[in-house]
Image: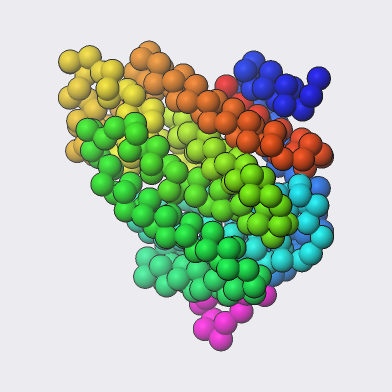
Amino acid sequence: MSLAATASEALAKGRARDDVERDAAFLAAVTELQALTKSDLAAVNDEILARMHSPVAMIPELAGHLISAGGKRLRPILTLASAKLFDYAGQDHVKLAAAVELIHGATLLHDDVVDGSALRRGASTANIIWGNKESVLVGDFIFARAFELMVEARDLRVLKALSHASGVIAEGEVLQLTTQKNLAAKFETYIEVVKAKTAALFAAATEVGGLISERSPEEEKAIRAFGLNFGIAYQLIDDVLDYDGFEASLGKTLGDDFREGKMTAPVVFAVARAREDEKSFWRRTIADGDINDGDFENACMLMQRDGAIDDTIACARDYAERALDALRRAPDNKYAEALSNLVITSIARAS
């Protein structure tokens, strides 16, 4: 059976595991890609650390806190794997992967300030330790370092892809603010937020791997489409896990999205399907932010009853299938197989 057929069959069946086993399968898929890109990934980490030097002591201290907090390095791995997928033999993929991770890190610092988050990957956020002003300014410093790396690749197409993604991410942040606590927010708007905040960087991360490999325009479009659709699917599942996951895998407190009034897909679906006598519950908790003991559990129950969780997972599966379809237009090798497995297991986290 071909890689594509195997991937589609596994995706359709899902994974009948408990939370720990499902998360372990996804982490194993990440570990597989880390192993395939091991030497390059080490070089990426070295590049990132080198770019954090500054005579202003707080900058490397705060940036080091963010970097040392860990994380899967998923986005830079996508850049490295995409380049190797197309047999790239140069070294620019390391700088670009580092740039991708720095863009991601800068947005995390800014996100935590905007959201008032206290935890990131199980540790206190930089804004809690150093303050909001400090986090925003160091985030700006990290953005600047990312652009230095982009320029060093000496490819205007690459610079355009990553700089455009940076702008789109900022637009997504603003768009999300307009939907927060807004019970009238539509699913279509939610998807636009996801495309901008999450999927834009996934798409750029994979696209630059294709661009520096100088492949055909069709293959470049395919690998970008893979990243875009995988990014949407990945975020949809993350939003499900805020209501139907467990904190050890989330790296944050369960129910954070609920307490912040974020109109993610499970909430959008649940609000649209609420019975007349339940609409006041969603107004109080989401729109007004008046949350009492037991409200989160009640929200989860309503989502399960009305199919909001199941339909969000179904939507994620649809985008995952689109990602796999795009990947079929790339070379069929060990990198394609590992990327396919990553998509499948990422969806299975909530199956």
- In the visual, does 297 lie left or right of 164? left
> In the rendered image, which quarter is residue 209 located in?
bottom right
Residue 189 screen position, x and y as percent: 33, 38
> In the rendered image, which quarter is residue 348 located in?
top right
- In the visual, does 338 lie left or right of 267? right
> Range of the magenta residues?
50-61
Residue 144 screen position, x and y as percent: 51, 73
Image quarter hosting the N terminus = top right
The answer to whether one can see residue 291 in this image is no
Is 337 above or below relative to 275?
below
Task: Reply yes or no: does residue 162 show up in magenta.
Answer: no
Of 125 and 47, nearer the camera is: 47
Question: Residue, x 72% and y 26% (percent of image)?
Answer: 4
- In the visual, does 296 lie left or right of 124? left
Of 115 and 221, nearer the camera is: 221
Residue 64 screen position, x and y as percent: 59, 68
Question: Residue, x 73% and y 57% (percent of image)?
Answer: 213
Of 303 and 215, nearer the camera is: 215
Task: Reply yes or no: does residue 54 show up in magenta.
Answer: yes
